[in-house]
Image (spheres, rainbow, N blue to C red):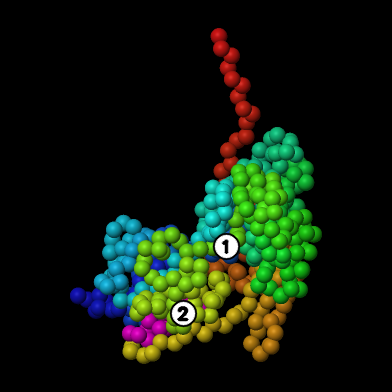
Amino acid sequence: MSQQGRLPHVVVVGGGFGGLAVVKALKDAPVRVTLVERHVYNTFQPLLYQVATGGLNPGDVTYWLRGLRLKQKNVRVLHEQLVGIDHDARRIRLLNDEWVDFDFLVIANGVTVSYFGTPGAHEHAFGMYSRSQALKIRDQLFIRLEKSAFTHSMEDGLRVVVVGGGATGVEVAGALAELRTAGLAPAYPEIHGSAFEVKIVQRGTELLKGFHPDLRRYAEEELKRRGVTLHLGAGVAEVLPDAVVLTGGTRIHADLTIWSAGVAPHPEVDGWDLPRGPRGRIAVGPDLQVEGRPGVFAVGDIAATPDELPQLAQPAIQGGRTAARNILALIEGRPTEPLRYRDKGTMAVIGRRAAVAEINVPGLRAPLRLTAGLAWIVWLFVHIMSLVGPRNRVTTLAGLVTRYGFPFHRRPIPIVGEVPTVRPPKEPSART
């Protein structure tokens, strides 16, 4: 066996924020790294809503994972899906029945959309946690617009209901409102403005629960100013093909229902024989090792940490780096260290020159709270610099400037996919 073959083998499952942080942190380490990912690309999920609303191409927010090999020779990428773990033999089984041995295992496969058992939600609502889901929303959006333009009917307008008033829900609704006001009015003169409605349904009484009350009020006022209708204080009891029924019995017409109300682990995690914590996530200790499973780590959204960290990018990135350091510590016989999370803050964009941001600046006792254009500029910088790869940064910057920048915002051209031709139904042929 070669020297390379005797190196400790680290298997990382998942190519999201947490998984990539682990892989990159082990770039110069004396280990072999295998990255297992069901997709051939990494997805920058914070900007998926821009793909769903025609603001960006899907390639702008995805990065080819094999491109990691250009700068990191100790990593191998396997385009497969984990289906089982043999903890005694320290190996994993992939969907193609291949077994992969490991010395250290990092679970970073993220989570998926949770419909909380709401009747009809799985069948009739569109989640937005993957590139394919974002593209389905985009296609349905323009299919409905073309149909409305063809019929010239107010009844055949487009009424979008966004379920969930967190950052994703606010950003989706804001982008749709921006698209309607600036992009579609000149392109679809057949559609009256009131025939394109955007509504948010939120179980709580306020939007953006994790933000300061002042920022919540600003976001609410901006959305209303942009024509977004808010239904606060009522959950969703049922999703129908053409409506959303609230817990109080109110029925809201919905041609397109977008679900951004919550997430849950992928179903296959149930078969991995790992301890579970709150909301089904994998229970880990302070050093991110899975409870009762030495050498097995979990990071990112799938990990239930003792401090109950939020399911955001920064906890995943910092957790991935901590897991990598602890793997090296175990190899060298040193004690592991706990994750010391540094909360850098949160932000959400509402539309052109409108965003909210809470930034934790070292030395300041309270977070720096920003709104309007300044918050939007900070949001733009953070998201552009967080993308993987220079090409993605350039194309995404160009796409966002074209959508929001002066003077392009007055006539933004949305990105569309395949939309079938709308034709009148054929009359049945007369029988002879």
- Label 1: which residue? 262
Check whether the beta carbons of the residues at disc 1 and disc 2 lie within 8 A of each other. no
**Where is residue 14 shown, x and y percent of the image?**
43, 66
Query: Can residue 38 be spotted in the picture?
Result: yes
Q: CA distance from mark 1 to mark 2?
A: 26 Å
Query: Can residue 176 be spotted in the picture?
Result: no
Question: In the figure, 291 relative to 110: above or below?
Answer: below
**Where is residue 13 shown, x and y percent of the image?**
40, 68
- Report whether 342 appears left or right of 32: right
Q: Residue furthest top?
A: 432
**Nearer to me, 125 or 348:** 125
**Nearer to me, 283 or 215:** 283
Q: Amino acid at mark 1?
A: Gly
Question: In the figure, 413 relative to 301: above or below?
Answer: above
Rendered image: mark on residue 145: none
Rendered image: mark on residue 321: 2
Instruction: Look at the image and give the residue range highlighted in magenta.
Output: 317-331
Residue at 60%, 69% in the rendered image = 383
Determine the main secondary structure of the stretch shown in magenta: helix
Q: Is residue 329 magenta?
A: yes
Q: Amino acid at mark 2?
A: Arg
- Report whether 368 appears left or right of 328: right
- Report whether 177 appears left or right of 344: right
- Of the 4 image quadrants, the one containing the N terminus is bottom left
Q: Is residue 6 magenta?
A: no
SS assignment at label 2: helix
Q: Residue furthest left?
A: 1
